[in-house]
Amino acid sequence: MAKRKLKKSKDTASVLGVKPASQKEMAQREKYVFSLAALALVVAVCAVPLTAETSSSGLSHHNHIILRMDEAILTVNNELATEVVVSWMSERCFQCLYQQLGVVPAGPSPGQPSSVDFVVSTQHGITLQLNSTPVQLEVPFHFGEHGNYSLWVKNLNDSAVVNCSVVTDADPVNSYIPILVAFLIFAGLASVSAIGTIILGLDVVKGMLFRICGSMETERLINSELGSPGRTESLVADNILPPPPSPSKRLRSLDTFRGIALVIMIFVNYGGGRYWFFRHESWNGLTVADLVFPWFVFIMGTSIALSINSMLRAGSTRCSLLRKVVWRSLQLFIIGVFIINPNYCQGPISWDNLRIPGVLQRLACSYLVVACLDLLVDALWAPGLDILLYWPAWLCVLFLEIIWLCLTFLLPVPACPTGYLGPGGIGDMGLYANCTGGAAGFIDRWLLGESHIYQTPSSRVIYATRMPYDPEGVLGSINSTLMAFLGLQAGKIILHYRDLHTRIMSRFLIWGLLLGVISAALTKCSTDQGFIPVNKNLWSLSYVTTLACFAYVLLVLVYYTVDVKKWWSGAPFYYPGMNSILVYVGHEVFEEYFPFRWRMANSQSHTEHLTQNLVATSCWVFISYMLYRKKMFWKI
């Protein structure tokens, strides 16, 4: 078992080229921001439930049918002389078989319809297929949550012509109101925080505070920050004592970026209010939940470049750093397998059902490969051609990518087409039901065994797959290594250009543009029609290039606002970004404990789930802030 301990450490990691604000002023801002964050948590708990009545009022009791979240009632009225078979297919399901919803018997007599109630999904638009002896009709429609709808099937004047119409009997609820309320609350508090910080930074306001307080402590603080207005002479000691050394400071933008990814990851892992766009995409495509893990891998690569450079400058040898890299990777892997393994939900952990891949395991592998490449390859910088920076390392990464392409598209998979990238199940007209993930799934089942990989992949939601499949599997680790290496490239740019902010940001944007063009070519700017679709389950090449493109653009924005212009301190995301491993492991281990989870009055309410998930996420931000104040950081 890996050792875990809390270490008190100073903020001394190497980051270059940014002149920090004074420590006291930063502490004042942090206290101010923290008080507003605590107020946000209280307001969220108290105000968001005010929308519960809107959401819970949609619980429909139509013929004793109690609806759950993302469901509606559809009553099919059949006036035809023959029975109608009703089937459905989600609009997000590519080339899928229709799934039977039920059968509506023929009308008892002309003008007298027979009726059957069905429960339909409201997450995405669906297409209804009506099959009867004379006709086959398809009716696309997007139902609203907890709405009541009627579908009328009847003959017109010409008995050979069948008419279908959907009528709304009871309006659906607006399940997105809780999100709007929560957004307005946090946006309002963020605006108040920004305005307050600007006001408190005005010389006039500081002068008024100085005159009102009049205490010696306030005078000392203002003198150290701004210089006393009436003071014209310096102390003799100021001319005798040497100036204190200015320690190197971390780039706050990197910790802020990491914190943004981590906070969103915690929120979506806790449920994201049970909204579909805060869950992983069933197969091809992107949702909010699909963004954060690659960003975390990306910024890990950036941190590798800066931390290794710092330790080498401090006198550490490459061999000693290599031993630390191997040991840290082993610790991450062990923690992922034995501490936060999802199989604990099924009872005591057993080798028979132990899941071997996982998030921390994927991080450990990517970290090991990229850090070793950075340590073992000497820098050969060529200005203007970033591809020649550490070109032997680039050759290694490209070789790994060639391996991924060959295994993905050339490896024969029993009973499956070579190069298959589909979900299996009812996808591809049900022809390859047991081919989920193609070569990636086959390799995991062959190397690890079906019982040691993820049993409930997201493809089950829409594609009704039956095969276990692990999104953190072996083959996808190659592309996560590429993602970390692209983050390492960002770190090398920062190291090379140091305090040349314009050059750094321009290079980031160029890389973002280049990766975006590659993504457009690979996907043909479509979800399912490209050569290599964007797919989180496969960690496809286009998924990596797309998310790396987004990461470079987001890093430019955060770097400019936090480290260049200092318009934003990075709070509150900065604090969890400083303690990322502890916060991630903690949110997994204590997920089922109060205050991160409690028994809800209505478990089928988006409002209650959203409130619970926001409170849980805010609690971890608060914990990370307190640890930051105590200078306690978990290092492995």
Image (spheres, grey):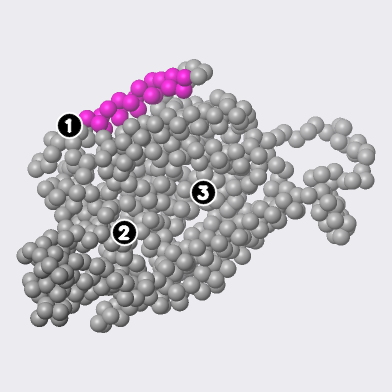
488 or 146, nearer to the observer: 146
Q: How many marks?
A: 3
The amino acid type of the residue labelled 3 equals: Gly
Q: Nearer the viewer, residue 131 or 509?
A: 131
Left or right: 609 with respect to 358? right
Q: Main secondary structure of the magenta part?
A: helix
User: Residue type at mark 2?
Assistant: His
Image coordinates of residue 498 in percent, x first then y, are: 60, 28
Mark 1 nearby-residue class (10 Å; few <14, some 14–19, many ≥20):
some
Q: Residue at x 41, y 63 (%)?
A: 273
Mark in the foreground, 3 or 1: 1
Residue marked by disc 3: 259
- How crowded is the residue under tag 3: few (<14 C-alpha within 10 Å), some, or many (20+)? many
Q: Is residue 269 magenta?
A: no
Position of residue 230 measured from the top left corner of the image (x, y, whole percent): 93, 46
Q: CA distance from mark 2 to mark 1?
A: 35 Å
In depth, the one of 170 and 10 nearer the eye is 170
What residue did someone put label 2 on? 124
Residue at 32%, 51% in the rendered image = 281
Q: Earlier in the sequence, mark 2 or mark 1?
A: 2
* Horizontal side, residue 554 vs residue 482: left or right: right
Residue at image location 13% in from the left, 51% down from the top: 430
Q: Earlier in the sequence, mark 2 or mark 3?
A: 2
User: Which quadrant of the structure image shows residue 20?
Assistant: top right
Residue under numbered circle 1: 410
The amino acid at mark 1 is Leu
Of mark 3 and mark 1, the one earlier in the sequence is 3
Left or right relative to 137: residue 240? right
